[in-house]
Amino acid sequence: MWGQAIWPVTLECGDLLLRPIKYADRGEWARVRTRNAAWLAPWEASNPVRGGGLPTFSAMVRSLNQQARAGTALPFVIAERVPDRRRPVLVGQLTVSSIVWGSAMMATLGYWVDEARAGRGIAPTAVAMATDHCFTALGLHRMEINIRPENGPSLRVVEKLGFRDEGVRPRYLHIDGAWADHRCFALTTEEVPDGLLGPWLERRGT
């Protein structure tokens, strides 16, 4: 069966980790999200159903775990080892979702990063780690990322990694209370025969 035995997995690159999200992350996740409320609000998914809200943290983790067991998602938190902290600190979230097997072999990737750590290469490194894992370990063929045209920081992430701009998808997702246009960026395995992570780290000199 497509997707069996792909989860759980932890990916590491230097001090950066992508590890499975878990119920025990609730407190730390909530603190980071609260501190970043204004930073994240313009890009946050919202519920188009009148009066509907977003799921609780527990409901989100439960749903993501179900998708992971079904082989349709990889729900990571982004964590970083920092001096004087015994355990890596949660600095963001990255989810590979809508994994399609069979003749498509593709997925969609989304992420957010703590504003206090933005601009340090965390997001592109995490995206490169996850994409390489999907292309090599899982054998997927295509990865896409959909970004609002106004989201400059995320546009710089895909630019740094060389994702191809496939154009605008009008009113593609319900974001911050309204249907919003998104630009679709994608890569296939043929476009990155050496992967993303190695070339990216070489370009940034690490």
Image (cartoon, helix red, strand yellow):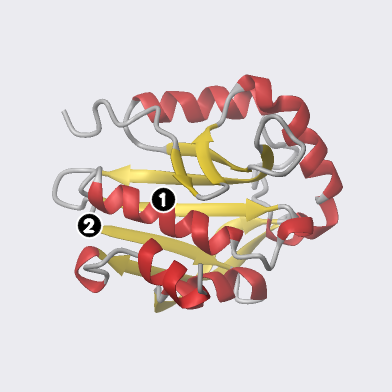
Give the mark nearest the N terminus, 1 or 2: 1
Q: Does residue 108 appear in this view?
A: no
Q: CA distance from mark 1 to mark 2?
A: 13 Å
Instruction: Name which residue type carries label 2.
Output: His
Q: Quadrant of residue 8?
A: top left
Q: Which residue is mark 1?
A: 130
**Residue 195 x %, y %:** 30, 63
Q: Does residue 43 appear in this view?
A: yes
Q: Nearer the viewer, residue 13 or 34?
A: 13
Which secondary structure, mark 1? helix
What residue sits 57% from the left and 76% below the top? 156
* 96 in relation to 177, above or below: above
Disc 2: CA contacts within 10 A as few (<14), some (14-19) or many (>=20): some
**Residue 143 x %, y %:** 34, 59
Which secondary structure, mark 2? loop
What residue sits 19% from the left and 69% below the top? 190
Instruction: Name which residue type carries label 1.
Output: Ala
Q: Nearer the viewer, residue 151 or 132?
A: 132
Disc 1: CA contacts within 10 A as few (<14), some (14-19) or many (>=20): many
Q: Which numbered tag is attached to residue 141?
A: 2
**Residue 103 x %, y %:** 14, 50
Work out which quarter of the rendered image holds the N terminus and state it: top left
**Residue 76 x %, y %:** 52, 39
Using residue 54 as the reference point, say whether residue 138 is left or right of it.
left
What residue sits 77% from the left and 43% below the top? 33
* 29 in relation to 136, above or below: above
